[in-house]
Image: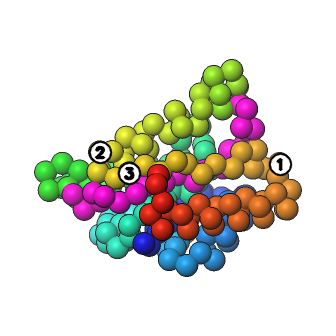
Amino acid sequence: MSVLLQFVHPVARKSRANRALLDAARAVQGVTVNDLYELYPDFHIDVAREQALLEAHAVVVFQHPFYWYSAPALLKEWQDLVLAAGFAYGPGGTRLRGKTLGSALTTGGAAEAYSPTGHNRYPIRALLAPFDQTAHLCGMRYAEPFVVHAAPRLSDAALAEEGARYADWLRALAAGAPV
């Protein structure tokens, strides 16, 4: 299976963690990297191009920093325009049915911060409910998310380990592993 990696980071050059993950992903056979901020810095999304990419891949991964318990603004704009009625959901909207959607995130906070007793009060999986529901509405399976916590504080060696873990996660999704 092929993987479409939707890379969404407004200041990627400043993110050691996201660059490390992106480099690891580029080395995985069958992964197509689609850098949305590079392609659409003005937010003028080529909907037909993006829909064709979705149709050509069995797995779609959104890789982004976890900003304010969500994604950078361009991903929301992309969802609003590309995941249109009649294409992704609703009458005739079956083009994504049976595919897999995954979230690959970096957070500034430690893993413990994402718990009922932590600073953020909720586990990551609960905070990703809108992405899970988006997958459901489109007839997709939602994969268990890939998360790198405390990303800005990780050493180069730790980032290399996370990159290897990410490559393994992408390979598993591409191989159709249970989500």
Image depth: mark 1 or mark 3 in front: 3
Q: Compared with residue 106, is residue 3 higher up or lower down, i.e. above or below?
A: below
Q: Residue 155 in the image: state x and y as whole percent.
A: 86, 56
Q: Residues within 10 Å of mark 3 (few under 14, many from 20)?
A: many
Q: Which mark is residue 153?
A: 1
Image point (59%, 27%), residue name: 122
**Neighbourhood count class around disc 1 (C-alpha, 10 Å): few under 14, some 14–19, many 20 upward:** some
Query: Sequence order check: which comes first, mark 2 or mark 1?
Result: 2
Q: Nearer the viewer, residue 143 or 104?
A: 143
Q: Which residue is mark 3?
A: 141
Q: Position of residue 4 (x, y in %)?
A: 46, 68
The image quarter in which residue 20 lies: bottom right
- Pointer 2: what residue? 137
- Residue 46 lies within the magenta run: no
Magenta span of residues: 94-113
Residue 67 position within the rendered picture, expressed as x and y whole percent measured from the top left: 60, 43
